[in-house]
Image: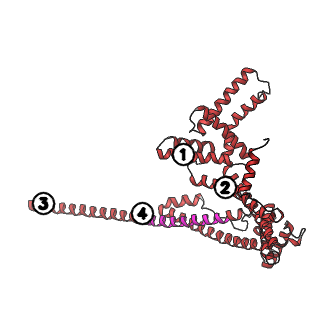
Amino acid sequence: MAKFVKQTSDLAQSLNRLQGFAENLISMETNRRIQLGREKEVRMTEAYQYMLNNENAEIAELEAGLDLIEQNLAARGVELKSVGDEFKTIASEELLAAANEGAVELLNVKLEDSRGHRDSLQQRKIKAMEIKRNIDLFDDAMTLADPAHYGDPGIIEAEDVAHAGLQWMEANEQEGPEIMQRLQALQTESELERLQTDYYAKLARESQEKITASTAETTDSSIKIKMLEDVKKETVEGVKAMTYQPISSLVEEFRGAITLSGEIASGENAATGQSLNASEVKAKEEAKNAEYTRLGVTLVPWAFSPEQAALEAQNLQSAISKAGNGNYQEIINYLKKGHAQYILWSQEGNQMSETYRSDIQRMLGIDIASKEWVGQLEELWWSVGQADIEQATEALKAGRQFLPEFEDGSDDEGRKDDLEIFMGGDW
């Protein structure tokens, strides 16, 4: 009996161990399946994220290309009105529903949305490129506009352009809001001047074999003078655009000093209009000097003393005034000097370089460390001066036939006579 009981006990223990093993096995298998599921979800999430990143990269590329087309057309007075709207993004409710299901479902919804966005941008870009091609063809045709259609037969006027434009649209069966915008832009003063220049150039080519060498040279000079005027005009506009922000900021920075100078000169308080007594004038003189010193120390930190800094600030104020009258040389000289000083300090490891750079960025909104920016500004202004020289040279070439021959007085006798005139007599 005891043996039977012992056998029963051993059997029960074996069954318990077997049950424990089975439970452990089931638990391990369950955990393994859970882990495999998680790993699969991670892999799917990574795959969806990879595809989503690719879609977003294509979207960025399409947007950049579309922006370039829009900027090109905007510069010519054309707004894309025939291009459809962009793909509308997914609703927040749909995103929330997908998020509740899981990360893979959420990424899938985002991926589908990005694909829709990409397809929408692709169609918009295709349409925009088609419009740009038509605008380019239209522009090429407008260079052949005949000025004889309306008014002065030698001057291209708005009506001449309108006539040529409508003829092109009818011949090519092309019309639309963009073409009409471009036609309107081509009738502005600046575009008419450009078309006139092209017309003169065409006349010069056609008349080359029909006129004498002298007349041809005069005509060529006139055309070059006119073209250089357009170049100079556009170049000056570039200088204005680049210096608008720093000059506007400088005007604001100097406003206090300018106001004090005006009050001292007029002897009146600008705010109240009342006359200033001697002590008030002295106080404003001191305030003005302090203001110039403050500006000079910040804007011209390489000055040797506060007094020199104040004087440099006044010189800079004069440069601002000259720039307002169209002479940008001194303000450009200041910016070149500031850039050179920054480079020198940087090479020396002087902390003043970053202090000066930070002050100029804060006050004028430009990066004085940018060699490209300063160099481009200097080149533009240099081109304005070169255009003036070239225009004067062409004018002399055109008018040389009407002027007496120039004598350089290089012979010894001529120099002797000049010297005698200079040294002797009643001067």
Q: Could you tell me if residue 133 is visible in this image?
A: yes
Name the residue type under label 3.
Val
- Say whether disc 4 or disc 3 marks the residue closer to the N-terminus: 3
Point out residue 82 in the picture as x, y percentages from the top left corner.
73, 68
Q: Which residue is mark 1?
A: 342
Name the residue type under label 4.
Val
Name the residue type under label 2.
Trp
Q: Which part of the image, by quadrant, shows the C terminus? A: top right
Between the C-alphas of marks 4 and 3, the distance is 55 Å
Of residues 310 and 425, the one drawn nearer to the viewer in this rendering: 425
The nearer-to-camera label among 4 and 2 is 2
Q: Which residue is mark 4?
A: 42
Q: Which residues are magenta?
A: 42-69
Q: Which residue is mark 3?
A: 5
Q: Kindly state the secondary structure of the residue where label 2 is placed.
A: helix
- Asked if the residues shown at circle 1 and circle 3 are in contact, with their CB atoms under 8 angstroms apart, the answer is no
Q: Which residue is mark 2?
A: 382
User: What residue sits 85% from the left and 67% below the top?
Assistant: 155
Between the C-alphas of marks 1 and 4, the distance is 52 Å
Point out residue 125 in the picture as x, y percentages from the top left corner.
64, 69
